[in-house]
Image (spheres, helix red, strand yellow):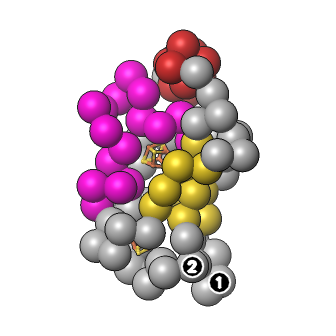
Amino acid sequence: MALKILEDCIACDACMQPCPTGAISAADPIYIIDPNICNECVGYADSPTCVDACPVECIVLDEAHRYSYEENLKRYQKED
Ligand code: SF4
Ligand code: SF4
């Protein structure tokens, strides 16, 4: 599953740098996650680094974009 950013986002920029896939971008008024790129940080970290970095807890699972663990791992390895 990919993650998505809710409208509570305060555009603080804290999530962009830790993201290993470059899935997060700054948009107006809130930041967005590209569900075709985000792989839940599988293969990189034990938990999504953007969630750990976000001060307002506005990053959640995107139920509309589900991927299995294996799919996420493959998608991460493709980034290398
Ligand atoms: S879960 Fe990982 S890959 Fe997805 S947007 Fe967050 S930091 Fe990037
Ligand atoms: S860390 Fe959270 S509040 Fe800051 S830009 Fe990212 S999603 Fe928005």
Above or below 9: residue 74 = above
Number of the label disc, if any, that sits on residue 75: none
Front position among marks 1 and 2: 2
The residue lying toward the viewer, choosing from 4 and 13, is 4
Residue 19 seen by the camera: yes
Which residue was labeled with disc 2?
A: 7
The residue lying toward the viewer, choosing from 17 and 50, is 50
Quadrant of the image where one finds ligand 2:
bottom left
Q: Quadrant of residue 24?
A: bottom right
Provide the major secondary structure of the magenta segment: loop
The residue lying toward the viewer, choosing from 22 and 60, is 60
Of the residues shown, which amino acid type is indicated by label 2? Glu
Of the residues shown, which amino acid type is indicated by label 1? Asp
Q: Position of residue 38 (x, y in %)?
A: 57, 41
Magenta residues (range): 38-53
Pick whichever of labels 1 and 2 is earlier in the sequence. 2
Graded by Cα atoms within 10 Å as few (under 14), some (14 to 19) or many (20 or more), the crowding at tag 2 reads few
Above or below 27: residue 15 = above
Above or below 35: residue 13 = below
Residue 46 located left or right of residue 66 = left
Residue at image coords 28%, 73%: 55
Q: Quadrant of residue 36?
A: top right
The residue lying toward the viewer, choosing from 80 and 9, is 9
Cα–Cα gap, marks 1 and 2:
11 Å
In what quadrant of the picture does the N terminus appear? top right
Number of the label disc, if any, that sits on residue 28: 1
Residue at image coords 44%, 84%: 10
